[in-house]
Image (cartoon, rainbow, N blue to C red):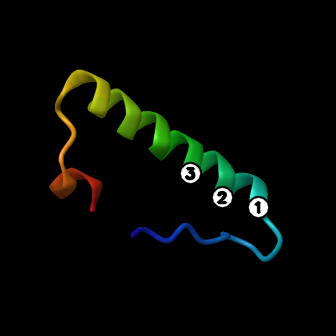
Amino acid sequence: MRLFRQPEPGDWDSVFKRVATELEKAVALKISGKWSWSKAR
C-alpha cells in the first residue's frame, strides 16, 4: 500500500493527479507484461 499525502492542507487536486499518474504507470506496466508485485511496492 502506498500513501499519497497532501503537500498542503486541502490540496486534494495534487493528490489525485499523483494517484492518476501512478495508476497510469501501473496499467502500462501490466499491459506490457512487465508488472510485478515488487514494482508495485
For residue 15, the mark is 2
Q: In the image, is residue 37 above or below residue 26? A: below
For residue 19, the mark is 3
Q: Are marks 2 and 1 in contact (CB under 8 Å)?
A: yes
Instruction: Return the residue nearer the eye: 21 or 38.
Output: 38
Residue indicated by mark 1: 12
Q: Are marks 2 and 3 in contact (CB under 8 Å)?
A: yes
For residue 39, the mark is none
The C terminus sits in image quarter: bottom left
- Name the residue at the top extreme: 32
Q: Position of residue 10 (x, y in %)?
A: 83, 71
Q: Position of residue 31 (x, y in %)?
A: 30, 24
Identify which amino acid the numbered label 2 is placed on: Val
- Name the residue at the bottom extreme: 9
Relative horizontal placement of residue 30, taking residue 6 as reference (left or right) = left
Spatial CA distance of label 2 from label 3 is 6 Å
Residue appearing at x 17%, y 32% in the figure: 34
Relative horizontal placement of residue 24, taking residue 12 as reference (left or right) = left
Q: So how many labels did they put on this image? A: 3
Q: Label 2 crowding class (10 Å Cα cut-off): few <14, some 14-19, many 20+?
A: some
- Label 3 residue SS: helix
Q: Label 3 crowding class (10 Å Cα cut-off): few <14, some 14-19, many 20+?
A: some
Q: In the image, is residue 35 above or below residue 2? A: above
The N terminus sits in image quarter: bottom left
Residue 32, picture quadrant: top left
Spatial CA distance of label 1 from label 3 is 11 Å
Residue 12, picture quadrant: bottom right
